[in-house]
Amino acid sequence: MRLTGREFWALVHGMFLGSLFLLAFAGGLAGLYSLRPELLTRAGIAERMRRLQIGTWGMAVIAWLVGHHGQLHRVPVVPSRGDGCL
């Protein structure tokens, strides 16, 4: 099976970066669910909040990478006519 350059970058964009984001999002939901009052202790709150902060930053970085990668590799470049119009 051969992939063109655009197909390869679409695969990276969707399968790699997209799956990382979905995995981080599911982990964030599980972390929020674990904040139920019957599951918490004082030490558990500090540990879970630290994990949620790291996960939130990780999701933000992954979402930024998905957007940046999509803009660079997936959006076709429209050539300018030279008169300022696209």
Image: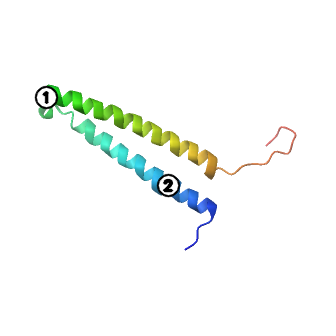
Tell me residue 46's x, y (percent).
Answer: 22, 27
For residue 41, above or below residue 31: above
Q: Is residue 29 left or right of residue 69?
A: left
Mark carried by residue 82: none
Q: Which residue is mark 1?
A: 41
Residue 18 in the image: state x and y as whole percent: 45, 51
Does 36 sit left or right of 80 as displayed?
A: left
Which residue ends up furthest to the right in the rendered image?
83
User: Across the whole image, how many numbered discs are drawn on residues?
Assistant: 2
**Which of the two labelled residues, at mark 1 and mark 2, occupies the earlier sequence position?**
2
Label 2 sits on what residue type? Gly
- Image vertical order of residue 72 relative to residue 36, above or below: below
Mark 1 residue crowding within 10 angstroms, few (<14) / some (14–19) / many (20+): few
- Residue for badge 2: 14
Q: CA distance from mark 1 to mark 2?
A: 39 Å
In what element is the residue under mark 1? Answer: loop
Q: Amino acid at mark 1?
A: Thr
Please give the name of the residue rendered at 46% of the width and 54% of the height, measured from the top-left corner. Answer: 16
Left or right: residue 55 compared with residue 75: left
